[in-house]
Amino acid sequence: MGPHPAVAAIRLAVRRVLHDLLTEHHLLAEDDRAPAVPAPAPHAAGAPAPRTPPAPPSAPSAEVSDASPLVLVACSGGADSVALASALAFEAPKLGVRAGGVTVDHGLQPGSGTRAAEVAARLAALGLDPVDAVTVTVGRDGGPEAAARDARYAALDAAAERHGAAAVLLGHTRDDQAETVLLGLARGSGIRSLSGMAPVSGAGGRYRRPFLHLDRQTARTACLAQHLPVWDDPHNADPAYTRSRLRHEGLPALEKALGKGVVEALARTAQLSRDDADALDAWAAQAERSVRDPAGLLECAKLYALPPAVRRRVLRRAAIDAGAPAGSLFARHIEEVDRLITGWRGQGAINLPGRVVAQRQGGRLVIRQS
């Protein structure tokens, strides 16, 4: 008798991600080992050129060693991340992958340190090694949710660097994706924000999200089927937090008004939006080179001729290159800079985050640090 369907689903999702990581790992290893290719020797006129036989494909070894790639799972103790940790612990040894875990103590609740230690012990009991319990200090920039997220990702980045991990797995589900799309829609964000969370993100593709096509209930059912204890963060039910209100009030109201399938539709919207955003970003990267003069300054007339979606992406890229923090650069900032191109009436400089200034000078758009 096979595993419970929910357990089989989470394991398959993790297995697919590990296969992708192994393929990338082997390709990098082959590139490192590949010798310089000498120039081909000349051959007689009319004779066929010598052919090099293709190298036979190599299958990943199931033997785990110190040279095996390490994959960490970020685990809060909640059902989604515990299910992910259990699936990683099961699949990694079968594929010759080392598996470890990280839990982050944000210090925002009484007893959080004890809880983090308990989560770390459970990860170790699953067979994960190394396991880190990291305490962070949460700032105030961007509100409590954003500040906690920034502190958490900084800790995960540090853990990945410390252990030389090939990737960090995150337990975001299809429900989380739907919530992210709705939050972006409520903020009046652009298509990139509506594309939600990417399956692969971070520097060098560090972060992987195997569960984006699975719903939250599947992860919880997998934990129940395996008798794995989980912790329900009270913040997730606290109406003081926007995402919590959306989860417990907004999405149920939408499903009541529109019928079941809202979460799946929003997740599908995220993927379609991501495809469009990627295409527009690629277009903007090419267009940016064509709208700069020989000195590298942006020419307003050429910017004006671009489609608005492409032009605004060029302006955003230029602002970030000048030092504006991407996370603090909002649509309203880019709209103001865009008016220097499309609604020029002699207005003054536009102040952007990061002490960056955008101003129009003699038919050129200058974006620089003040």
Image (cartoon, rainbow, N blue to C red):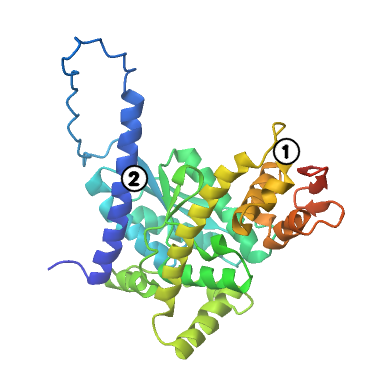
User: 124 or 345: which is nearer to us?
Assistant: 345
Residue 266 location, quadrant: bottom left
Q: Residue at x 17, y 32 (%)?
A: 56
- The answer to which of marks 2 and 1 sits earlier in the sequence is 2
Question: Circle 2 — which element?
Answer: helix
Residue for point 57% across, 53% down: 135
Label 1, secondary structure: give it.
loop
Q: Position of residue 348 (x, y in %)?
A: 87, 53
Residue where numbered disc 1 is placed: 297
Crowdedness near tag 1: few (<14), some (14–19) or many (≥20) residues, C-alpha within 10 Å: some
Pinpoint residue 226: horizontal percent, then vertical percent: 28, 68
Quarter of the picture holding the N terminus: bottom left
The amino acid pointed to by label 2 is Leu
The label number, if any, that marks residue 129 in the structure image: none
Quadrant containing the C terminus is top right
Front residue of 43 and 94: 43
Q: Is residue 155 visible?
A: no
Query: Would you call the spot at circle 2 few (<14 residues within 10 Å), some (14-19), or many (20 or more)?
Result: many
Please tell me the numbered disc located at residue 21.
2
User: Callout 1, which amino acid?
Assistant: Leu
